[in-house]
Amino acid sequence: MIHQITANQESFRPIQLNPGLNVILADRSEASSRKDTRNGLGKSTLIEIIHFCLGARVQSGRGLAIPALEQWAFTMELSLGADRVAVTREVARPNTITVTGMSNRWPHIPPANLLGIRSFKLEQWRALLGAALFSLPSREKQKYNPSFRSVLSYFVRRGHDAYGDPFSHFSRQSTWDRQLHVALLLGLEWRHAVRWQLIKDRDKKLRDLNKLLSDGAFPGLGGSIGELEAERVALTQDIEDSSIALETFRVHPQYESIEREANELTEALRRKRNASVLAARRLKIYNQAVKSEESPSGTAVEAVYEEMGVVFSEAVRRSLDEARRFYGLVVRDRRRFLEDEIGRLERRMAVTKAQIAELTERRAKILRILEEHGALDEFVRLRERHAEHCQRLQGIVDQIENRREVEAKERRIARDRAALADLTARDYEERRANWDFPVRQFNRNSQALYSAPGHLVIDTTDSGFKFDIDIRKSGSDGIGKMKIFCFDLAVLEFSAGREMAIDFLIHDSEMYDGVDSRQRAAALERARKVTERTGTQYVCALNSDMVPYSDFREGFVFDDYVRCRLQDGAASGTLLGIAF
């Protein structure tokens, strides 16, 4: 419980707080004008001071860490267990917190000096407050843990974003953070939320790996495991064949010149064979011509003419005999020429045949050399191709192993998720006595504000805890704010009866902004009733125009709960008492 808040500057308005309902009221003074405003009087600053004394980090130029407050130090008196301690923190030295009134029963605390003052480092102070106010365990060696600062922010909501959702205290709060801390607040096993998040982390890593595989982590490799296995088998065979080829490969130093000679012999053989074919065709023609070259018979010519009734004279007959003798000489000379040509062609063909045989034998020897040997560059290409196949095979093997590992991990994640869902469901039932109380208190709180009770819903799903709130006509912003009020008040009452020792709840005027005046009145009355019955403390800040005097029930005297009135019009009326 918070008892008092002071500062080292005389201008500061000390705040005295009591058990039950406490109101910090921002009022308009008679001297204020229309231009004056109740914003900036110190309502939100008071919440900043409380957070400051309870270990909030500071950022230069924001909140209290401004030049105008550099010389300031704030002190808050509160109860920690059986001790009433005074906590002091200087704006200029925010990493050191001094505490008085603390007994030695607390473990792992700094020793006190002669004046009974203990100096804590920031993380030390946070750890002590986590144990004292929420029975938080010492920081475990795991990625996700309940945070004192996070769970405190459900009891001292700060900033506009803290009033948007009952289960969050800032807009970008992660799912695991909400699940873990709300589970802790409602008496559920918060470690299940940690386990859910660890499973989600594993699942995300697998999805990232799958994306890498599909986006080209192994370029050119795709398809199912079966398709990759088929390619692996084919590549393995190619590698085995190329290995044998490399082992038996012999490099001839003159391979290129021998290969050129083989090509030249092939070309020479082609020319010789073409010449032989042409000579054979000419020989055939000459042989046919020799057979057809015969001297014509003179009697045959005369017989023809006699049949026609022509009778040659003696002179004509002599001319025919001379012509016959001349033609016979021509035929004889032609036959002799053809016979000479035939002999020449036959000799030439015999030479060509011998040359073809010789060229064929020479080429055969060269081809045998080429068959038995290879060129160096051919060997290099064969080796490079072999290396490429080996590299691709390794890529396929890695891809197959990765995909099998991913599938195996997916199956393990599915099993772990199912097992955790069963465990969470069983634990949910076993802890019914815990969460049943805040659920019932939320319903009672909402029924005190509205005609029908609302419902705080706690579900266990295959992705962790799921929380929801249902209040009829919950579309308006005002009802949304009252969901937060009912939830926070239920959690405060639940905490008061547990090991968690926190017993105060603080709301800024943001909580009542946009809320119907009747619900505002009902909320303040409900806060008083619950806190007085449970011995807890509710602190709220209000603007005077938010006070629903006409809607309070008879007997409820609002002004009895106002602990401090802040006024506009002059700096002295603000919480800090200065203008900046």
Image (spheres, rainbow, N blue to C red):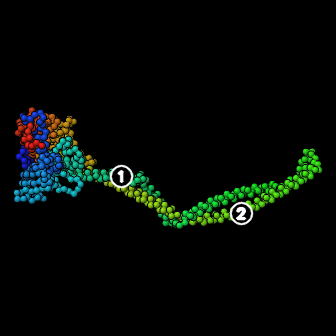
The residue drawn where x is 5% and y is 57% is 115
The residue drawn where x is 66% and y is 62% is 356
Q: Nearer the viewer, residue 550 or 554?
A: 550
The disc at residue 72 is none
Q: Are marks 2 and 1 in contact (CB under 8 Å)?
A: no
Which residue is farthest right? 314
Q: Is residue 21 visible?
A: no
Estimate how packed mark 1 is, as few (under 14), some (14 to 19) or many (20 or more) residues with alpha carbons within 10 Å: few
Which residue is disc 1 drawn over?
A: 212
The residue drawn where x is 12% and y is 49% is 70
Q: Nearer the viewer, residue 530 or 504?
A: 504
Q: Nearer the viewer, residue 330 or 214?
A: 330
143 relative to 539 in the view: left or right: right
What amino acid is at disc 2? Ala
Compared to residue 273, the image places residue 482 above or below, namely above
Residue depth check, mark 2 versus mark 1: number of the one nearer the observer: 2
At numbered mark 1, what does the secondary structure look like: helix, strand or loop?
helix
Which residue is disc 2 drawn over?
A: 350
Q: CA distance from mark 2 to mark 1?
A: 75 Å
Using the rendered view, name the quadrant where residue 170 is placed: top left
In percent of width and height, residue 230 lies at 44, 55
In percent of width and height, residue 71 lies at 10, 50
174 relative to 561 in the view: left or right: right
Q: Nearer the viewer, residue 464 or 560?
A: 560
The residue drawn where x is 15% and y is 46% is 63
Estimate how packed mark 2 is, as few (under 14), some (14 to 19) or many (20 or more) residues with alpha carbons within 10 Å: few
Q: Is residue 247 visible?
A: yes
At numbered mark 2, what does the secondary structure look like: helix, strand or loop?
helix
In percent of width and height, residue 27 lies at 9, 37
